[in-house]
Image (cartoon, grey):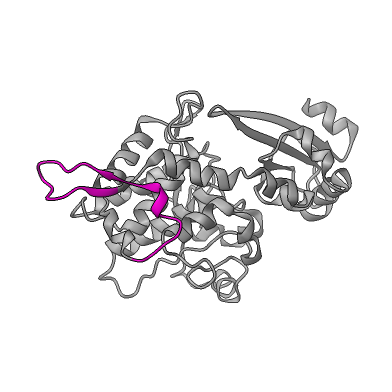
């Protein structure tokens, strides 16, 4: 399961890692790998890049996926049987509303700073946190999953095309297609991109008509080991197609302030803050893909933000992190909301 923000990296890495785990242990009939989308089912419409990528990969988000608020998932998460375990992807600390399952976490695959939790239930062998010397060593959790896929594949030229496209799309999104100006990708991301492009039988993905695929594929000249030229995703076109969906200004300008704040929201604990109403020292961070200057154009934007902070997120401090991409360079701004002037002064 991915983090509570449920972005494309969280959703796709959970799905793909489940596929990898199921492939490795296909002979173990008593073990099932069940990917869970870490957001409510109704919120999937707000994850436009992930939704588009799933459609391109032939996955029906309504019938093929399990969401955290589905009755079957809630029943599963409330199961106290010892046989139930959890793998965290794209984060390394279980969300607060599932903390009763803390001891069930046995595996972590992530690229953020290690918060140091779940040390008693997750062995070093099962704790892969790609973060060293204050830097992430990969730009996407999907790169880590792709590496596992390559390692377990007996035939690296037989990668499932749907899985390959989903992983490729997220890595390109997260690294801004390995833009040097953005500096978000590493050599491991580039290697994963190159391997996915070269070793995935893309023609299998094109056997079923898909309106989203035709314009992002190109024909690669054949080499000495090929009888004919083969189709392959054009990484520039694929990145542009997904990025355009993710950063669509009309989409972001049209949503309410509350939806904009909750589409990519994460909660953090910090001993530097005064305790919130529930006794926890915490703060929230909402990432929005709009310039801060456009937020006042939204109806009741300030009131909705304060209500989100105090009633939905229930935190004493909320950061609104704005990001837009100009010439492949991410431009960020930060706006802080707090329950007191003293708290804001302490943070600034």
Looking at the image, can residue 106 be seen? no
Q: Quadrant of residue 141?
A: top left
Does the magenta segment cover residue 213? yes
- Residue furthest out toward the left: 224
- The image position of residue 24, as x and y in percent, is 28, 61
24 up-or-down from 268: above or below: below
Residue name at image x 84 percent, y 33 percent: 343
Residue name at image x 43 percent, y 45 percent: 238
51 up-or-down from 239: above or below: below
Residue name at image x 48 percent, y 47 percent: 119
- The image position of residue 21, as x and y in percent, is 34, 60
Residue name at image x 29 percent, y 71 percent: 28
- Left or right of 285, for residue 227: left
Query: Would you say the magenta stretch is mainly helix, strand or loop?
Result: loop
Does the magenta segment cover residue 249? no
Magenta-highlighted residues = 208-231
């Amino acid at each position: 399961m991915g983090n509570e923000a449920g972005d494309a990296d969280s959703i796709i890495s959970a799905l793909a890692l489940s596929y990898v785990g199921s492939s490795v242990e296909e002979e173990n009939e008593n073990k099932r790998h069940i990917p869970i989308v870490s957001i409510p089912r109704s919120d999937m419409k707000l994850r436009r890049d992930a939704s588009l990528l799933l459609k391109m990969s032939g996955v029906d988000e309504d019938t093929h996926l399990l969401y955290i608020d589905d009755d079957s998932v809630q029943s599963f998460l409330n199961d106290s049987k010892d046989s139930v375990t959890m793998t965290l992807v794209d984060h390394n600390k279980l969300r607060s509303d599932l903390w009763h399952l803390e001891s069930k976490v046995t595996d972590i695959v992530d690229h953020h700073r290690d918060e140091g939790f779940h040390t008693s239930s997750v062995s070093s062998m099962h704790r892969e946190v790609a973060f060293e010397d204050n830097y992430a060593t990969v730009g996407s959790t999907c790169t880590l999953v792709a590496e596992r896929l390559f390692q377990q594949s007996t035939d690296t030229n037989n990668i499932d095309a749907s899985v390959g496209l989903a992983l490729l799309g997220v890595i390109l999104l997260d690294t801004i297609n390995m833009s040097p100006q953005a500096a978000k990708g590493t050599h491991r991301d580039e290697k994963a991109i190159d391997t996915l492009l070269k070793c995935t039988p893309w023609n299998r993905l094109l056997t079923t008509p898909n309106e989203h695929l035709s314009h992002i594929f190109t024909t690669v000249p054949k080499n000495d080991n090929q009888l004919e030229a083969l189709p392959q995703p054009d990484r520039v076109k694929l990145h542009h197609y997904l990025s355009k969906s993710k950063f669509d200004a009309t989409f972001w300008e049209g949503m309410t302030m509350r939806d904009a704040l909750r589409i990519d929201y994460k909660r953090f604990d910090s001993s530097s803050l005064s305790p919130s109403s529930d006794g926890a020292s915490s703060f929230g961070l909402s990432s929005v893909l709009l310039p801060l200057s456009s937020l006042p154009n939204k109806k009741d934007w300030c009131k909705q933000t304060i209500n989100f902070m105090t009633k939905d997120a229930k935190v004493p401090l909320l950061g609104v992190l704005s990001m837009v991409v100009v010439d492949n360079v991410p431009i960020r701004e930060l706006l802080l909301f707090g329950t007191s002037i003293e708290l804001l002064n302490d943070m600034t």
